Image (cartoon, grey):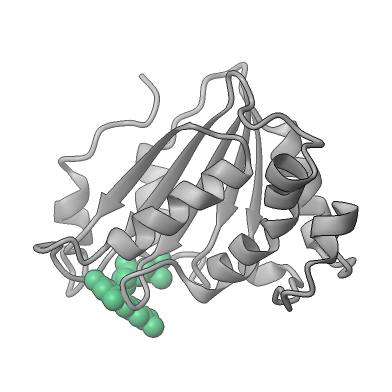
Amino acid sequence: MKILVIHGSPRKKGNTMKFFQKIFNPGSGDEVRSFSLVDLDIHPCTGCLACFEKGECIFQDDMVRIYEETRWADQIIFTTPVYFNTVSSYMKLMMDRFQRDYARRFILKLEPKVEAGKSGILLATAGSVERHHEFDGLRFPADLMFKSQGIRDYRVILLDDVDEGRLEERMTSQKKLYT
Ligand SMILES: Cc1cc2nc3c(=O)[nH]c(=O)nc-3n(C[C@H](O)[C@H](O)[C@H](O)COP(=O)(O)O)c2cc1C
Protein backbone atom coordinates (compact mmCIF):
# COMPACT_ATOMS: atom_id res chain seq x y z
CA MET A 1 0.00 0.00 0.00
CA LYS A 2 1.19 3.53 -0.78
CA ILE A 3 0.78 5.59 2.38
CA LEU A 4 1.08 9.37 2.52
CA VAL A 5 1.49 10.97 5.94
CA ILE A 6 1.02 14.70 6.36
CA HIS A 7 1.88 16.11 9.77
CA GLY A 8 0.13 19.28 10.92
CA SER A 9 1.82 20.00 14.23
CA PRO A 10 4.55 22.63 14.35
CA ARG A 11 6.15 20.52 17.13
CA LYS A 12 7.91 17.70 15.32
CA LYS A 13 8.62 15.85 18.55
CA GLY A 14 5.35 16.79 20.20
CA ASN A 15 2.42 14.77 21.47
CA THR A 16 0.86 14.19 18.08
CA MET A 17 4.06 12.80 16.56
CA LYS A 18 4.66 10.58 19.61
CA PHE A 19 1.15 9.21 19.40
CA PHE A 20 1.45 8.68 15.66
CA GLN A 21 4.75 6.83 16.02
CA LYS A 22 3.35 4.67 18.78
CA ILE A 23 0.48 3.29 16.70
CA PHE A 24 1.79 3.51 13.12
CA ASN A 25 3.33 0.22 12.05
CA PRO A 26 3.16 -0.18 8.27
CA GLY A 27 3.77 -3.53 6.64
CA SER A 28 7.08 -4.40 4.96
CA GLY A 29 5.52 -4.05 1.51
CA ASP A 30 4.11 -0.61 2.21
CA GLU A 31 5.70 2.52 0.77
CA VAL A 32 5.48 5.52 3.08
CA ARG A 33 6.04 9.16 2.20
CA SER A 34 5.88 11.82 4.93
CA PHE A 35 5.71 15.60 5.04
CA SER A 36 5.53 18.12 7.85
CA LEU A 37 3.45 21.11 6.88
CA VAL A 38 5.66 23.36 9.03
CA ASP A 39 8.45 22.78 6.47
CA LEU A 40 6.33 23.70 3.48
CA ASP A 41 5.52 26.99 1.85
CA ILE A 42 1.74 27.07 1.42
CA HIS A 43 -0.04 30.30 0.57
CA PRO A 44 -3.50 30.74 2.11
CA CYS A 45 -6.44 30.32 -0.25
CA THR A 46 -7.65 33.77 -1.31
CA GLY A 47 -11.03 32.57 -2.59
CA CYS A 48 -10.37 33.78 -6.13
CA LEU A 49 -12.15 30.64 -7.39
CA ALA A 50 -9.85 30.33 -10.40
CA CYS A 51 -9.88 26.60 -9.60
CA PHE A 52 -13.62 26.49 -10.28
CA GLU A 53 -12.91 27.48 -13.87
CA LYS A 54 -9.50 26.01 -14.58
CA GLY A 55 -9.15 23.21 -12.05
CA GLU A 56 -5.80 24.66 -11.01
CA CYS A 57 -4.67 27.01 -8.27
CA ILE A 58 -3.07 30.36 -9.06
CA PHE A 59 -0.37 29.69 -6.42
CA GLN A 60 2.52 27.51 -7.55
CA ASP A 61 3.94 26.65 -4.16
CA ASP A 62 4.48 23.45 -2.16
CA MET A 63 0.81 22.50 -2.53
CA VAL A 64 1.67 21.39 -6.07
CA ARG A 65 3.67 18.56 -4.48
CA ILE A 66 0.87 17.78 -2.04
CA TYR A 67 -1.64 17.59 -4.93
CA GLU A 68 0.64 15.04 -6.64
CA GLU A 69 1.30 13.00 -3.51
CA THR A 70 -2.34 12.81 -2.48
CA ARG A 71 -3.16 11.41 -5.93
CA TRP A 72 -0.31 8.90 -5.61
CA ALA A 73 -1.42 7.52 -2.23
CA ASP A 74 -3.78 4.63 -1.51
CA GLN A 75 -4.10 5.88 2.04
CA ILE A 76 -3.67 9.42 3.36
CA ILE A 77 -2.98 10.01 7.04
CA PHE A 78 -3.27 13.54 8.38
CA THR A 79 -2.03 14.27 11.89
CA THR A 80 -2.80 17.41 13.89
CA PRO A 81 -2.99 18.78 17.40
CA VAL A 82 -6.35 20.26 18.39
CA TYR A 83 -6.05 24.05 18.44
CA PHE A 84 -9.13 25.98 19.56
CA ASN A 85 -11.24 22.86 19.08
CA THR A 86 -10.20 22.32 15.49
CA VAL A 87 -7.15 21.47 13.39
CA SER A 88 -3.89 23.42 13.57
CA SER A 89 -3.54 26.48 11.37
CA TYR A 90 -0.95 24.63 9.26
CA MET A 91 -3.52 21.97 8.49
CA LYS A 92 -6.27 24.52 7.87
CA LEU A 93 -4.08 26.29 5.31
CA MET A 94 -3.62 23.04 3.41
CA MET A 95 -7.27 22.12 3.81
CA ASP A 96 -8.49 25.35 2.19
CA ARG A 97 -6.15 24.75 -0.73
CA PHE A 98 -7.92 21.41 -1.31
CA GLN A 99 -10.65 23.62 -2.77
CA ARG A 100 -8.78 23.02 -6.03
CA ASP A 101 -9.38 19.27 -5.68
CA TYR A 102 -12.97 19.84 -4.59
CA ALA A 103 -13.53 21.94 -7.74
CA ARG A 104 -11.92 19.32 -9.99
CA ARG A 105 -14.06 16.56 -8.48
CA PHE A 106 -17.44 18.18 -7.92
CA ILE A 107 -17.61 21.31 -10.09
CA LEU A 108 -15.58 20.45 -13.18
CA LYS A 109 -16.00 16.68 -12.79
CA LEU A 110 -12.44 16.00 -13.91
CA GLU A 111 -12.00 13.31 -11.24
CA PRO A 112 -14.37 10.67 -9.89
CA LYS A 113 -16.42 11.63 -6.84
CA VAL A 114 -15.12 8.59 -4.99
CA GLU A 115 -11.72 6.98 -5.49
CA ALA A 116 -12.26 3.24 -5.18
CA GLY A 117 -10.05 1.57 -2.60
CA LYS A 118 -8.66 4.81 -1.23
CA SER A 119 -8.83 5.41 2.50
CA GLY A 120 -7.92 8.04 5.05
CA ILE A 121 -7.13 8.64 8.68
CA LEU A 122 -7.14 11.84 10.69
CA LEU A 123 -5.14 11.39 13.87
CA ALA A 124 -5.29 14.11 16.51
CA THR A 125 -4.30 14.84 20.07
CA ALA A 126 -6.05 17.25 22.41
CA GLY A 127 -5.03 18.60 25.77
CA SER A 128 -8.37 18.38 27.48
CA VAL A 129 -11.16 15.83 27.78
CA GLU A 130 -13.90 15.68 25.20
CA ARG A 131 -17.15 15.86 27.16
CA HIS A 132 -19.74 17.58 24.95
CA HIS A 133 -18.66 17.23 21.32
CA GLU A 134 -15.97 19.92 21.76
CA PHE A 135 -13.94 18.40 18.95
CA ASP A 136 -16.68 18.20 16.36
CA GLY A 137 -14.88 21.19 14.88
CA LEU A 138 -12.20 18.70 13.96
CA ARG A 139 -14.52 16.04 12.57
CA PHE A 140 -16.78 18.10 10.30
CA PRO A 141 -13.93 19.80 8.40
CA ALA A 142 -12.19 16.42 8.17
CA ASP A 143 -15.24 14.99 6.46
CA LEU A 144 -15.06 17.67 3.75
CA MET A 145 -11.30 17.35 3.47
CA PHE A 146 -11.56 13.63 2.77
CA LYS A 147 -14.45 14.27 0.41
CA SER A 148 -12.23 16.64 -1.59
CA GLN A 149 -9.83 13.71 -1.93
CA GLY A 150 -12.53 11.31 -3.09
CA ILE A 151 -12.26 9.41 0.19
CA ARG A 152 -15.38 8.04 1.86
CA ASP A 153 -13.61 5.37 3.87
CA TYR A 154 -11.91 7.29 6.67
CA ARG A 155 -11.46 7.23 10.42
CA VAL A 156 -10.81 9.96 12.96
CA ILE A 157 -8.56 8.82 15.80
CA LEU A 158 -8.56 11.35 18.60
CA LEU A 159 -6.53 10.99 21.76
CA ASP A 160 -7.82 13.55 24.24
CA ASP A 161 -6.70 14.49 27.75
CA VAL A 162 -2.98 14.30 26.94
CA ASP A 163 -1.72 17.50 28.58
CA GLU A 164 0.12 17.88 31.90
CA GLY A 165 2.13 14.73 31.37
CA ARG A 166 -0.74 12.35 30.69
CA LEU A 167 0.31 11.43 27.14
CA GLU A 168 2.16 8.19 27.98
CA GLU A 169 -0.64 6.94 30.19
CA ARG A 170 -3.29 7.86 27.62
CA MET A 171 -1.40 6.11 24.83
CA THR A 172 -1.27 2.75 26.58
CA SER A 173 -4.89 1.98 25.74
CA GLN A 174 -4.44 2.69 22.04
CA LYS A 175 -4.17 -0.11 19.52
CA LYS A 176 -1.81 -0.34 16.56
CA LEU A 177 -3.08 1.18 13.32
CA TYR A 178 -2.48 -2.00 11.31
CA THR A 179 -2.51 -5.50 12.70
C1 LIG B 1 -2.64 27.29 20.27
C2 LIG B 1 -3.12 26.08 21.02
C3 LIG B 1 -4.47 25.84 21.11
C4 LIG B 1 -4.94 24.71 21.77
N1 LIG B 1 -6.28 24.51 21.84
C5 LIG B 1 -6.76 23.40 22.44
C6 LIG B 1 -8.15 23.16 22.49
O1 LIG B 1 -8.96 23.93 22.00
N2 LIG B 1 -8.58 22.03 23.12
C7 LIG B 1 -7.71 21.14 23.69
O2 LIG B 1 -8.15 20.15 24.23
N3 LIG B 1 -6.35 21.34 23.65
C8 LIG B 1 -5.87 22.45 23.04
N4 LIG B 1 -4.50 22.65 22.97
C9 LIG B 1 -3.60 21.62 23.50
C10 LIG B 1 -3.07 20.72 22.40
O3 LIG B 1 -4.13 20.21 21.60
C11 LIG B 1 -2.31 19.50 22.92
O4 LIG B 1 -1.30 19.91 23.82
C12 LIG B 1 -1.71 18.70 21.79
O5 LIG B 1 -1.41 17.41 22.25
C13 LIG B 1 -0.46 19.36 21.24
O6 LIG B 1 0.08 18.52 20.23
P1 LIG B 1 1.58 18.71 19.72
O7 LIG B 1 2.49 18.47 20.90
O8 LIG B 1 1.74 17.70 18.65
O9 LIG B 1 1.69 20.11 19.20
C14 LIG B 1 -4.02 23.79 22.34
C15 LIG B 1 -2.65 24.05 22.25
C16 LIG B 1 -2.20 25.18 21.60
C17 LIG B 1 -0.71 25.43 21.50
Please tell me which residue is depicted at 35% across the width and 68% down the height of the picture: 82
Q: Position of residue 104 (x, y in %)?
A: 77, 45
Q: Quadrant of residue 94?
A: bottom right
Could you say which is closer to the camera, residue 95 or residue 32?
Answer: 95
With 96 as the anchor, is 26 left or right in this view?
left
66 versus 46 height, above or below: above
Could you say which is closer to the camera, residue 131 or residue 125?
Answer: 131
Could you say which is closer to the camera, residue 64 or residue 5?
Answer: 64
48 versus 159 height, above or below: below
Where, quadrant-wise, is the C terminus in this rendering? top left
67 versus 175 height, above or below: below
Q: Position of residue 173 (x, y in %)?
A: 15, 40
Ligand 1: image quarter: bottom left
Could you say which is closer to the camera, residue 61 or residue 170?
Answer: 61
Q: Position of residue 150 (x, y in %)?
A: 61, 35
Please tell me which residue is depicted at 64% across the width and 32% down the height of the picture: 113
Please tell me which residue is depicted at 50% across the width and 36% down the height of the picture: 120
With 77 as the anchor, is 173 left or right in this view?
left
Where, quadrant-wise, is the N terminus in this rendering? top right
Please tell me which residue is depicted at 55% across the width and 65% down the height of the picture: 91
Outermost residue on the left side: it is: 131
With 163 as the anchor, is 4 left or right in this view?
right
Q: Quadrant of residue 106?
A: top right
Count of labels in the image: 0
Q: Quadrant of residue 154?
A: top left
